Image: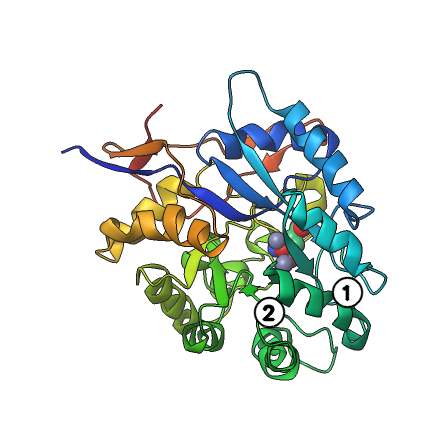
Amino acid sequence: MTQTLTLRRPDDMHLHLRDGAMLAAVLPESARHFARAIVMPNLVPPVVTGAEAAAYRDRILAALPEGMAFEPLMTLYLTEATDPADVAAAHASGLVKAVKLYPAGATTNSASGVRDFQKVRAVLETMAEIGLPLCVHGEVTDPAVDIFDREAVFIDRVLDPIRRATPGLRVVMEHITTEEGVDYARAGGDDLGATITTHHLIINRNHILAGGIRPHYYCLPVAKRERHRLALRAAATSGQARFFLGTDSAPHPDHLKEHACGCAGCFTATNTMPLLAHVFEEEGALDRLEAFAALNGAAFYRLPPNPGTLTLMKGDAAPFPAKIETGAGPVTVFDPGFPVHWKVLD
Ligand SMILES: NC(=O)N[C@@H](CC(=O)O)C(=O)O
Ligand SMILES: [Zn+2]
Ligand SMILES: [Zn+2]
């Protein structure tokens, strides 16, 4: 039996497009299904200034294949030296939609991130005044804190104090992975949003470690216990405006994932929409997929929903490529470990 589902064209509110050969290879994978994406600034070196964001945006648009439409929503990488006036100008011109906070050392390419939060107070105050959202990688970097607790501890030690000290600051808790994250987001007001990835709706920590170590399931924040995955599923499928899709699709070439010290990141741009249809169907919430993937994120960023639509069809198992080729080496596409019967119609 076939079934179809049509929704507004979705947006990916947390995406790593990288640069150069990798950008050229992964951009079409997102542009095929998504109209817009919040593009992460953790390049090497990072995208810190408005001028750097403008140049990166031009490189993205230059890499877009003929005939494809895609709008990159640019972000700035917050450093202790970020100039509030530059941030305000980049926002006023319409170029920049968010500023990204990486605690120094928390994740891939975060060495230039923030160590001393006092040093970014002036930027945060400017952002609160102008309504520019702060996207937060919410993990503490204290080596004494267990990696599975780093998100929950970050909420108590860092996020909540920042929000209390900066009334009006709009915050997106990026890629939440815990029940504590879900609860904190739910309790916040309209100034608080939270992105949820595709893979955290599908895997728990056993998928990474049971029966052999699976580097392609390793990402940050690391997947947690099953009860956390279930809390994320409940949040994503709730339809609540607070929760929206940010795939965190984060390509790394296979030789750096399958490595003695493998990189963090799951590449999900290629098959996110079929996987989400599968998950939402399992949860009896197919009618809420549009809110999660196409409406709630746009509303948080004060953007109109996309005019176009995307249609998914359920039928025979629809395989997707195991890898995509890139000029930087092959990149493995996230494997959910079950057959997927949904596909996106062209
Ligand atoms: N999520 C990841 O595991 N990796 C991201 C960085 C990030 O979003 O933390 C990357 O850039 O590779
Ligand atoms: Zn992150
Ligand atoms: Zn990310």
Task: Give the numbered dot on residue 105.
Answer: 1
Q: At 58% from the left edge and 57% from the top edge, which residue is drawn?
A: 213
Q: Nearer the viewer, residue 119 or 92?
A: 92
The amino acid marked with disc number 1 is: Gly
Q: Which of marks 2 and 1 is nearer the N terminus?
A: 1
* Pointer 1 local density, CA inside 10 Å: few below 14, some 14–19, many at least 20: some
* Separation (CA) of disc 2 from disc 1: 24 Å
Along the horizontal axis of the image, is 112 left or right of 331?
A: right
Which part of the image, by quadrant, shows the N terminus?
top left
Q: Is residue 115 visible from the viewing direction of this image?
A: yes
Q: Residue farthest to the left?
A: 1
Q: Please tell me whether mark 1 sits on a helix, a strand or a loop.
A: loop
Residue 196 vs 342, above or below: the answer is below
Instruction: Point out residue 262 in the picture as x, y percentages from the top left corner.
Output: 70, 53
Q: Is mark 2 on a helix, strand or loop?
A: loop
**Residue drawn 66% across and 78% down?**
158
Give the image location of residue 254, x and y in percent: 66, 40
Kind of residue at badge 2:
Leu
> Residue 70's spot in the image, x, y percent?
53, 31
Closest to the observer, 134 or 19:
134
Which residue in the protein does label 2 denote? 169
Residue 55, compared with residue 131, is above or below; it is above
Q: Which of 139 and 114 is in front in this view?
A: 114
Could you tell me which residue is drawn at 64 percent across and 76 percent down?
166
Residue 22 in view of the camera: no
Residue 231: quarter of image:
bottom left
> Which label belongs to residue 85?
none
- Residue 48 placed where, x, y %? 79, 51
- Quarter of the image for residue 82 reads bottom right
Number of marks drawn: 2
